[in-house]
Amino acid sequence: MDETRRLIRVRTRHNKPAFKRRGLHRKSRLEDVWRRPRGLQSKQRAQFKAKGALPRPGYGSPAAIRGMHPSGYEEVRVFTPAELTGLNPETQAVRIGGSVGNRKRGVIQTRAMELGLKVLNAKDLTRAAEEPVATEEEVNEDE
């Protein structure tokens, strides 16, 4: 585990260039995602230093920690409480899917705490639980 933590620290300290798409500053409609420069007269393709670096194999992180969260856990995406069974709390952490609603999110978070799992994108759901929901009878009494 100590070697893993050391490698994660090295990965964060690694001075990796920001791989920018050619012409990104010129057109607002271009997305900030890497595209290989293919033009014959492209200075970036010809690897002029001032035009930005191209992704190369040497820039990658060590294979032992590739894809790991900076906290040192392996991320596991979860959409239902049943998917929490069989996860190892020492090596794995939970990331709740973005399409999960607040009610099920609360169930997943409490179940993960019981199992000793770390939730990477935990939300404070106390405020949602405190708000009283108006029933149909209360609405009819007000009228």
Image (cartoon, rainbow, N blue to C red):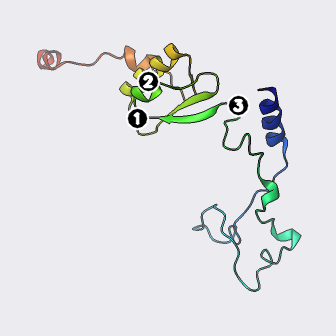
Residue that extends furthest to the right in the rendered view of this protein? 49
The picture places residue 91, in percent across and down from the top left corner, at 64, 27
Q: Is residue 15 above or below residue 142?
A: below
So how many labels did they put on this image?
3
Q: Are marks 2 and 3 in contact (CB under 8 Å)?
A: no
Residue shown at the point (59%, 22%) measured from the top left: 89
Residue shown at the point (51%, 25%) measured from the top left: 123
Q: Image quadrant of residue 126?
A: top left
Q: Earlier in the sequence, mark 2 or mark 3?
A: 3
Q: Which residue is mark 1?
A: 100
Say if residue 120 shows up in the picture.
no
Residue shown at the point (80%, 42%) measured from the top left: 11
Q: Which residue is mark 3?
A: 72
The picture places residue 9, in percent across and down from the top left corner, at 82, 35
Characterize the local packing of mark 1: few (<14), some (14-19) or many (20 or more) Cα atoms within 10 angstroms.
some
Give the spatial CA distance, label 2 vs label 3. 21 Å
Q: Amino acid at mark 2?
A: Ile
Q: Are marks 1 and 2 in contact (CB under 8 Å)?
A: yes
The picture places residue 56, in percent across and down from the top left corner, at 78, 62
Q: Is residue 50 above or below residue 88?
A: below
